[in-house]
Amino acid sequence: MIELELHGGRAGYGPVEALHGVDLVVATGSLTALLGPNGAGKTTLLSVLAGIVRLRAGSLRWQGKDVTRLSAARRVRQGMLLVPEGRGTFPGLPVVENLRVFARGGDHAVATEAFPVLGERLQQRAGSLSGGEQQMLAMSRALLQRPRVLLLDELSSGLAPQVAAQLLATARRLADEGTTVLLVEQYADEALALADHVHVLNRGSVVFAGEPGELRDGVPGVTRPLRASS
């Protein structure tokens, strides 16, 4: 089953076009890695899917319905969640209040079970947490809200490898449990090990789309290692 279909997507900022006719097909319940060098358009692509950046041309369908003009707020209400590179938490609130907001009044135990360190920091302001702890807190929103589509922008950016591995494993688990995950990731090898499908962007265009094993064998025009942020 197809979750998302972007056809001929063009988008940008002011006079600058960042995506040049991008096509993207994402299967339901899969983990798709979006890789590429700096400035390739990966973050812009996630922003288009989330409705934050409007398409200038092309169309987007979500489970067969045209959502090209659907607002970002309505996409959130219908189950699309973007965890941005800037963490996406409330830095002035304690961890426990962040979790309560994310849980929408429900039990937030699932988050502290997945990330025990958060249970030790419940009264600490989110903004005073380490980078890894802040990203765990941001990821808790996905665990608590169980979105239909989860968009992760640079999940492990700047984090220790052990923390990055824990977060990436959580993303894989969510996909295994039915959430459709799109992951922009700086650790290409780790992302390829977890992904079902991979798209490589370069200068606003998709230069490769396929299975991770095909990319490991080499793709014309793409050099390794593919380590870069958006």
Image: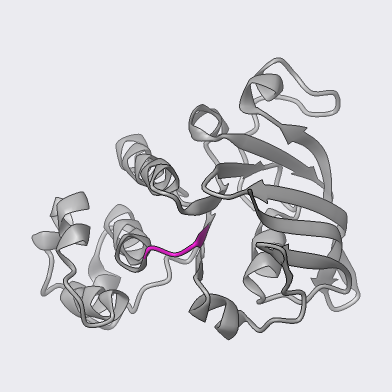
The image quarter containing residue 87 is: bottom left
Q: Is residue 167 left or right of residue 45?
A: left
* Residue 163 or residue 100, whichever sits in front: 100
Direction top: furthest residue: 217
Residue 154 seen in this snapshot: no
For the point 49% across and 62% down, which residue is it?
148
x, y percentage for residue 23?
Answer: 82, 51
Total marks shown come to: 0
- The chosen color scheme is one colour
* Residue 164 or residue 146, whichever sits in front: 146
Q: Is residue 24 left or right of residue 56?
A: left
x, y percentage for residue 119?
Answer: 11, 61
Residue 16 seen in this snapshot: yes
The image quarter containing residue 219 is: top right
Q: Is residue 211 above or below residue 37?
A: above
For the point 52% across and 51% down, which residue is it?
181
| The magenta stretch spans residue 16 | no
Q: Main secondary structure of the magenta part?
A: loop
The image quarter containing residue 214 is: top right
Q: Is residue 187 above or below residue 76?
A: above
Q: Is residue 62 left or right of residue 177?
A: right
Which residues are drawn in magenta?
146-150
| The magenta stretch spans residue 147 | yes
x, y percentage for residue 111?
Answer: 22, 60
x, y percentage for residue 13?
Answer: 80, 74
Q: Is residue 225 above or below residue 78?
A: above
